[in-house]
Image (cartoon, rainbow, N blue to C red):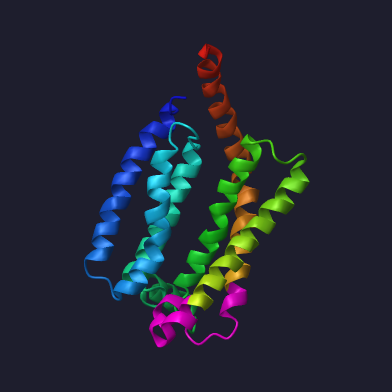
Amino acid sequence: MALPSASSRLLLPLSGILIVLLVLSGWQPYDRLTWLLEVFPVLIALPLLWFTRHSFPLTSLLYLCIFLHASVLILGGAYTYARVPLGFWMADWFELSRNPYDKIGHFAQGFIPVLVAREILLRGRYVQGRRMLVFLLLCIVLAISATYELIEWGAAVALGQGADEFLGTQGDPWDTQSDMGFALLGAAISLLTLSRWHDRQLARLTTAAVPSSASAP
C-alpha cells in the first residue's frame, strides 16, 4: 500500500530534523549516559516508523505528534530534565521551587502515546464502543507510565548515584505519582481535543487505502 501523500510529505522532513537534533544534542550533552537513556526511545521509534511506512502508515497528525514528543525527549537528554533552560524560565514565571520540565515530558508521555494506541485499536477494530475505547486508552497510558517508572527504578538500582540525572526527582518524594498523574492528564486532554481531528484523518487514510486494496489480485 502506498504511503498517503500527506504523510509522505511529513515523514521525510520530520525525520531529517530529528536526526539533526539528535546529532546536536549528542555532541556535548551534560551527561552522556543520561542522554543515551533519554533518547533511546527515539532511536527505536524512528527506524520503526520508516520500516512500517508502507505496511502500516500513520496519520499525519500522529507523525507530527511523535516528532514533538521526540523533540521533548531529545532536549531533556541534552541538558538532563532538571537543567533544561525552558524549565528554569517556567519556574521563574510560575514561582515554582523546582525545574518542571520533566512534567512536560510526562505530560507528553500521555498526550502522544494515547493517540498511537487509539490509531492501532481503531484501525484494527479491536474495540467496540467509544466509552470502552476511552477507558482502555487511559489504562494503556497508565501502564506505559508505570512501566517507565519501573525502568527508572531499575536504572537507579543498577547505576546507583549515577542514575540521579536520569531520575530527575529533584528531591520530590511524590515524583513518581505526579509523573503518572501528568501522563494521565496529557492523555485525557489529548482525547478531548484531538479525537475528532484524528477521526477525520483516519477516515482519509482508510479511503486512500481502498484503491490499492481494490486493485490487488
Q: Is residue 132 visible?
A: yes
Write the residue at 51% across / 12% down.
Answer: 215
User: Could you tell me which residue is drawn at 40 percent across and 56 percent down?
Assistant: 42
Question: Which residues make up the magenta segment?
Answer: 155-178
Residue 85 seen in the figure = no
Q: Is residue 148 left or right of residue 79?
A: right
Is residue 161 part of the magenta span, yes or no?
yes
> Which residue appears at 50% of the width and 87% of the height?
171
Q: Main secondary structure of the magenta part?
A: helix
Residue 11 position in % (x across, y down): 38, 39
Residue at 45%, 38% (x, y): give it: 52
- x, y percent for residue 164: 42, 83
Report the front residue among 37 and 191. 37
Q: Is 177 part of what is drawn in magenta? A: yes
Whether 120 is drawn above or below 192: the answer is above
Quarter assignment of residue 40 = bottom left
Q: 135 left or right of 176?
A: right
Q: Position of residue 9 (x, y in %)?
A: 36, 33
Q: Looking at the picture, tell me which residue is in the foreground, 184 or 192.
A: 184
Residue 202 lies, with reference to residue 167, above or below; the image says above
How many badges with numbers are in the image?
0
138 w.r.t. 194: above or below: below
Image coordinates for residue 128, horizontal then vertical, percent: 76, 39
